[in-house]
């Protein structure tokens, strides 16, 4: 499985993890959840350790945890951290998404 974290996203995740004193086994959970205006939405969370069935990736020193359900929707997704006049946050570019909505955090396949 391949997930791309841009250098800016890697820096933001590492900053957040160091500010909150996470454990050495901690990582970024990237998930797809039912919901949102288009059917699915992305979820990001810092977790202390992976679950038993998670796929664990090491991306530029950041451990990334992906559950079996989410793997099918996240192949090739690029996660970036963007700052605009309207705010800052993580953005997703998913080559598997057939559509999305204006909020940018939900998609259809």
Image (cartoon, helix red, strand yellow):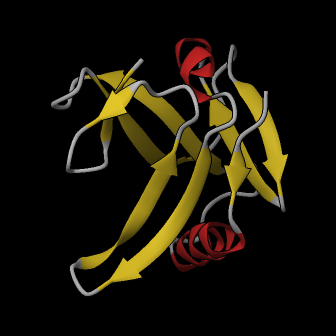
Residue 41 in sight: yes
Residue 77 falls in which quadrant of the image? Answer: top right
**Whether residue 18 is situated above or below residue 52 in the rendered picture:** below
Residue 107 in sight: no
Residue 41 lies, in percent from the top left, at 32, 33
27 and 59: which is toward the camera: 59
Residue 27 lies, in percent from the top left, at 66, 49
Residue 99 lies, in percent from the top left, at 34, 30
Point out the residue furthest to the left here. 37
The residue at the point 59 percent across, 29 percent down is 74
- Judged left or right of residue 36, residue 40 is right
**Whether residue 79 is situated above or below residue 51 in the rendered picture:** below
Identify the image quadrant of the C terminus: top left
**Whether residue 107 is situated above or below residue 86 in the rendered picture:** above
66 and 98: which is toward the camera: 98
Identify the image quadrant of the N terminus: top right
The residue at the point 22 percent across, 40 percent down is 101
Residue 25 lies, in percent from the top left, at 75, 48
Q: How many numbered circles are shown?
A: 0
The residue at the point 75 percent across, 49 percent down is 63
């Amino acid at each position: 499985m391949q997930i791309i974290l841009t250098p800016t996203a890697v820096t933001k995740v590492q900053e957040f993890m160091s500010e909150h004193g996470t454990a050495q086994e901690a990582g970024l959970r990237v998930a797809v959840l039912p919901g949102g205006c288009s059917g699915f939405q992305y979820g990001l969370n810092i977790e202390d350790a992976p679950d038993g069935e998670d796929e664990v990736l090491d991306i530029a020193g950041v451990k990334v945890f992906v559950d079996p359900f989410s793997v099918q929707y996240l192949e090739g997704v690029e996660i970036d951290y963007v700052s605009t006049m309207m705010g800052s946050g993580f953005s997703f570019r998913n080559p598997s998404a057939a559509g999305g909505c204006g909020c940018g955090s939900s998609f259809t396949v």
